[in-house]
Amino acid sequence: MTDQAQDHPQRAAAPFPWAKAFAIVGVCAILTAGSLTWYFFLKVTPTAMLIPSLSEEMTRGQFSSYVGGLQGQNNLQVASLHTKEEFAYISEKKLFHYMPGGIVEVAARVPCQITYHVQLKDSEWSFYIRDQGRRLIVVAPTISFNRPAIDLAHYDLRVIKDSMIRDSEEVKLALQNEIPGLLEEVGRKNIDSIRDTARISIKNFLEQWLFNSFGDKQIITPVVDRVYFADEEHLFKNIIFADTPSAGNRY
């Protein structure tokens, strides 16, 4: 037996076929991915495609109904600005048209709150639906603001330069009479600074409207993608009307 074992040495073990194993795993992965793809396109996708999207009539009717149900709310507040303004007023008079009659300078520190809003009722809101009802582009009415509310507790009106021959109270009264108009100008100049805040407020309002109106219905609810204002035609004109045949629904 010893001589026979020496004549026939033990055969070496064959190496494990790694390449074959990897090939089998790869084929299984491809078959699994193909099965999942087939299931998605033949089972899931047709079901999703059966879900209707918003139409022009539904959008117009539901929005009008929702706004009509907001009792006593004609405007939507979109931003609030707290500011502290400084105004000065200098008055100089002459006696007999040529003699100096005294110079009085007064100043006012006016803290106030300016509330910005867009009109809900009796105004034009435009809705443009994109991506088969999945995105909503909105053009809201122009931004307006209420009369600035002055914080009288911190209102300060003072005389900077007085005159012995002038009545400073008269000059202070003249400045006070101008302050409402000056604050109106402040409110108007700050409209651009609150636009982005206003867009977010409108987006939140419209998403709440969509949820309340269509949340319990089998319908594709769009995402409020962009919000523009009526005076921003230079921004939305090319975007909305880039593809005229599919410009979407408008209200």
Image (cartoon, rainbow, N blue to C red):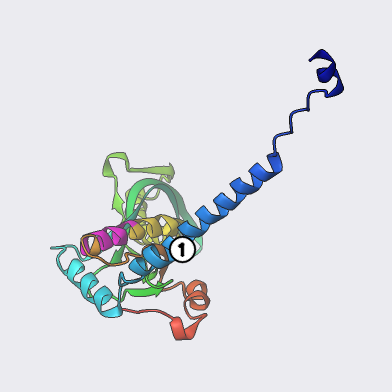
Task: Give 231 or 51, whichever is nearer the viewer.
Answer: 51
Q: Residue at x 33, y 56 (%)?
A: 204
Q: Position of residue 244 (x, y in %)?
A: 48, 85
Q: Quadrant of the N terminus?
A: top right
Residue extending farthest top: 2
Task: Give 9 or 110, whichever is nearer the viewer.
Answer: 9
Q: Position of residue 81 (x, y in %)?
A: 37, 51
Task: Give 233 or 153, whichever is nearer the viewer.
Answer: 233
86 within the magenta span: no
Q: Is residue 228 above or below residue 109?
A: below
Q: Quadrant of the C terminus?
A: bottom left
Question: On the image, numbered disc 1 is attached to which residue?
Answer: 38
Q: Does any portion of residue 146 appear in the rendered image? A: no
Q: Residue at x 86, y 22 (%)?
A: 7
**Which quadrant would residue 176 be assigned to in this image?**
bottom left
Callout 1: helix, strand or loop?
helix
Q: Residue at x 28, y 52 (%)?
A: 149
Q: Residue at x 45, y 49 (%)?
A: 105
Give the magenta-colored segment's residue range. 204-213
Q: Position of residue 147 (x, y in %)?
A: 29, 59
Which amino acid is tagged 1? Trp
